[in-house]
Image (cartoon, rainbow, N blue to C red):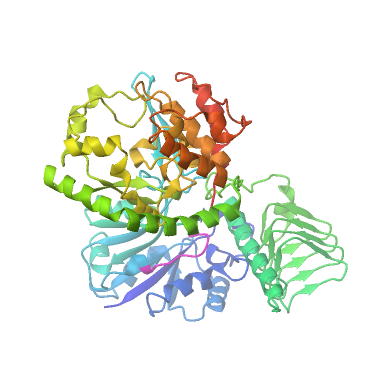
């Protein structure tokens, strides 16, 4: 029973002008070669020697370079020769197919895929990567047969996110492979479809992290930029610690008149001529030659490439002779839809010191409050237990900071089948947003109505504060279904921890007619203006107004009319521009 690694190699289109031995596995990754990096991951799950299968004819020069990168390769052959290889192994063996086409930013971890017995031949497993958009959301327009818009469907990562970007690796038992020979290995996505079409059970294992399409030039450049930037950061840290972490290999030759600007990796035996200018992030591969007075700007120069004198190349992968690269150097291809979206830099709007102190101090304060209020809470628990059937506490899944789910606890104030009853009562909804409310709700128990009137049903949320899931002051904790309506609002309110009380709770005015737009307005105002003084004002207002039964003036809470606010004027409920106005800056309102 063996786990046999099979590396699938291709010659991408941008390498068509490379030497005959160029391929994806031989692409440099700033500090190493892709082949060696992949094999380090393989060695964590199996000690078996790897096989390399190519979509081109592997000539002796290619085989020599592959074995130079990793000497212990069992076999190198073309994809069409896979069938005789499969016949070598027993049905209890498994084939681990790995392709670097869809490649993670920090390398691939195969352990989640291979945490199954090697002799489990019941199904095939695939390590699947998913798209990673900047705002972790996507909107698709759905239309009818006549082309009229039926609805706009929003998808949120990771809760509702059915958008795979590629398959990183596939674990195929030989017993399964023998049922569908010959295997389609043009890509692991094609293999996955072939196995499913032939009735072979498949299981997808999600991979969490950014991935790049290395079959696309833009994807390789983006990965190179990420890796070179990480190495530059490591070098700066090493300098502080008194260590040497130079990005220029000792065996490289750099002319004294050459200039290197920014983060640049110069690998073994590379040569940079007189007057050459190298602008980072760039990588100069093994044995590469940069001619005199040449300019290389944000490029990946592959091993053995030769850049002629006085040549200028920008935003390209340079392989072989630089003539082709220079001819198209003016075309910027640094970004493309095929590469993983890099997260936008966030603008921090709060004082980090206060946010940190708040996160450390509030759990201690909540623990003290739990001890002081424990006699009263025990009495409430007895009343809930004696007056209705069911558990004393009710825990509902809510989204916390950065959309992390948690159980939000309350004293149970409703019947145990309240969720099922809500569907039948949907027609009596009084709110204008996703939250549900109605007068004389038949689901509320007698003791529950009293607890709700006193806001005492929320006292168990002190335990959520002790656990670091909530705060004393913040946006109302909401389930995923309530956070889908307005994307900027979702991003803003989930940038801070939810609170037992908040600006919306004490300032809202239209409780009886629905106030969803005020909810958006006040949540985003709080995120933009969060401070110790504002939190203290909200806590005092919560006590004085009996939990917001009388609205507190917004001018008093904020101290002055904020530039991004329309103060106490209620946003227009039916105008889309209103939501955009109050949330225009909210996607960047992220706090730590």
Q: Position of residue 556 (x, y in %)?
A: 55, 32
Q: Nearer the viewer, residue 218 or 352?
A: 352
Is 309 placed left or right of 151 in the picture? right
Q: Position of residue 422 (x, y in %)?
A: 21, 32
Q: Which residues are magenta?
A: 103-111
260 vs 375, nearest the viewer: 375
Question: Which residue occupies 78% across, 74% down?
Answer: 253
Can you say which quadrant of the picture contains the N terminus?
bottom left
Residue 170 horizontal/vertical position (percent): 35, 62
Magenta span contains residue 547: no
Q: Majority secondary structure of the magenta segment?
A: loop
At horizontal 53% and vertical 21% (from top left) the residue drawn is 569
Q: Nearer the viewer, residue 158 or 47?
A: 158
Residue 214 visible to the viewer: no
Residue 120 image-quadrant placement = bottom left
321 sits left or right of 496 in the view: right
Asked if residue 437 is positioned above or below residue 542 in the image, the reply reads above
Q: Is residue 316 visible?
A: yes
Please determine whether, in this image, residue 114 is positioned above or below residue 73: above
Q: Residue at x 23, y 53 (%)?
A: 378
Counting from the top left corner in percent of width and height, residue 216 is at 55, 52
Count of all numbered marks drawn on residues in the image: 0
């Amino acid at each position: 029973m063996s786990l046999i690694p099979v590396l699938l190699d291709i010659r991408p289109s941008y390498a068509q002008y490379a030497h005959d031995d160029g391929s994806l596995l031989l692409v440099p990754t700033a500090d190493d070669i892709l082949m060696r990096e992949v094999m380090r991951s393989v060695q964590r799950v199996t000690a078996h020697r790897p096989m390399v299968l190519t979509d081109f004819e592997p000539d002796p020069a290619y085989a020599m370079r592959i074995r130079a990168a990793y000497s212990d390769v069992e076999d190198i052959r073309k994809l069409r020769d896979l069938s005789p290889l499969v016949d070598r192994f027993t049905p209890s063996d498994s084939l681990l197919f790995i392709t670097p086409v869809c490649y993670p930013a920090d390398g691939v971890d195969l352990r989640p895929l291979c945490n199954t017995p090697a002799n489990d031949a019941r199904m095939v497993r695939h390590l699947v990567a998913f798209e990673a958009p900047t705002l972790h959301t996507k909107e698709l327009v759905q239309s009818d047969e006549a082309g009229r818009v039926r609805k706009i469907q929003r998808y949120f990562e990771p809760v509702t996110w059915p958008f795979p970007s590629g398959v990183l690796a596939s674990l195929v038992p030989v017993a399964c492979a023998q049922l569908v020979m010959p295997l389609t290995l043009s890509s692991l996505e094609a293999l996955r479809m072939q196995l499913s079409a032939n009735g072979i059970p498949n299981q997808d294992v999600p991979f969490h992290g950014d991935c790049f399409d290395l079959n696309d030039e833009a994807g390789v450049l983006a990965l190179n930029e990420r890796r070179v930037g990480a190495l530059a950061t490591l070098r700066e840290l090493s300098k502080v610690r008194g260590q040497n972490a130079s990005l220029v290999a000792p065996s490289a030759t750099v002319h004294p008149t050459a200039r290197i600007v920014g983060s640049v990796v110069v690998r073994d035996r590379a040569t940079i001529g007189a007057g050459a200018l190298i602008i980072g992030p760039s990588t100069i591969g093994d044995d590469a030659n940069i001619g005199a007075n040449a300019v290389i700007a944000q490029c990946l120069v592959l091993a053995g490439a030769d850049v002629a004198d006085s040549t200028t190349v920008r935003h390209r992968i340079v392989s072989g002779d630089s003539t082709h690269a220079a001819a198209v150097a003016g075309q910027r291809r640094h970004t493309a839809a095929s590469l993983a979206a890099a997260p936008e830099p966030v603008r921090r709007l709060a004082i980090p010191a206060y946010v940190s102190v708040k996160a450390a101090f509030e759990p201690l304060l909540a623990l003290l409050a739990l001890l002081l209020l424990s006699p009263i809470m025990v009495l409430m628990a007895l009343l809930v237990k004696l007056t209705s059937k069911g558990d004393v506490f009710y825990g509902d899944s809510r989204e916390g900071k950065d959309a992390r789910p948690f159980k939000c606890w309350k004293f149970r104030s409703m019947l145990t089948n309240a969720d099922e009853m809500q569907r039948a009562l949907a027609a009596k909804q009084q709110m204008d947003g996703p939250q549900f409310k109605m007068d004389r709700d038949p689901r509320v128990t007698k003791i529950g109505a009293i607890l709700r009137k006193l806001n005492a049903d929320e006292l168990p949320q002190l335990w959520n504060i002790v656990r670091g899931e909530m705060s004393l002051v913040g946006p109302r904790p909401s389930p995923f279904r309530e956070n889908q309506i307005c994307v900027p609002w979702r991003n803003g309110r989930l940038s801070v921890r939810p609170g037992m009380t908040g600006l919306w709770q004490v300032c809202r005015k239209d409780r009886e007619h629905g106030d969803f737009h005020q909810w958006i307005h006040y949540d985003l105002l709080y995120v933009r203006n969060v401070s110790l003084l504002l939190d203290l004002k909200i806590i005092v207002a919560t006590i004085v107004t009996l939990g917001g039964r009388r609205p507190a003036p917004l001018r008093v809470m904020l101290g002055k009319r904020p530039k991004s606010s329309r103060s106490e004027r209620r946003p227009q409920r039916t105008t889309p521009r209103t939501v955009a106005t109050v949330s225009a800056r909210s996607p960047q309102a992220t706090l730590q």
